[in-house]
Amino acid sequence: PTINYYVQQLFTANSGARYLPTTVSAAQEKMIALSCVLESNSGDMILKLVSRSDVPVRAEIALSGVGDIAPNASCTVISGDLMDESLYSFWNSHLTTPRTEALEVAPQFSYEIPAHSLSVIRMKTRNSAQ
């Protein structure tokens, strides 16, 4: 699969029914785009962050619009050097494959957004399906 395939897959699998107010403060705010939604089927809050910065960006995130947020979330990230796309091939597909890790979250938390990346943070809420 290509980089574009993975990005489309992440956006499709993490869509939501209702936008939620979210504030992100960072030194390079103009280099960041975000969307925070509530998925109606699972009750999960999904925060998508896109960085076009050449360096990682430390962001302070303030979530609102839902009740309790579970402290453990999953964070799926796809990132890479701009030149990776020209090197991408069947033999080098490892250069830009998404990786998922656990992330501690709260209504206000810090997150370092990798350079040239899409981060999808999926959080369980009080309304999440168990």
Image (cartoon, rainbow, N blue to C red):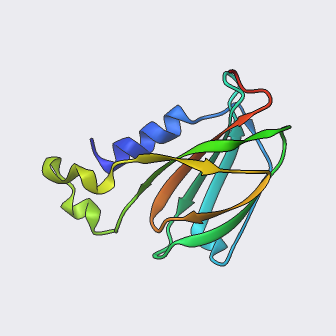
- Taking 123 as reference, is 84 above or below it? below
On the image, which quarter does residue 81 sit in?
bottom left
Quadrant for the N terminus, please. top left
Q: In the picture provided, is 36 more to the left or to the right than 56? A: right
Q: Position of residue 54 (x, y in %)?
A: 45, 75
Residue in view at x 32 percent, y 54 percent: 96
Quadrant where the C terminus lies? Answer: top right
Give percent across and percent down for residue 77. 47, 52
Name the residue located 70 percent from the left edge and 40 percent from the top edge: 37
Q: Is residue 23 above or below residue 30?
A: above
Residue at the image position 47 percent from the left and 60 percent from the top: 117
* Residue in the image at 45% along x and 65% along y: 116
| Whole-percent x, y for residue 103 in the image | 60, 50
Horizontal arrangement in the rendering, residue 108 relative to residue 50 (left or right) = right
The one of 64 and 29 positioned closer to us in this rendering: 64
Residue 125: x and y in percent read 75, 34
Residue farthest along the left direction in this orientation: 91
Residue 110, picture quadrant: bottom right
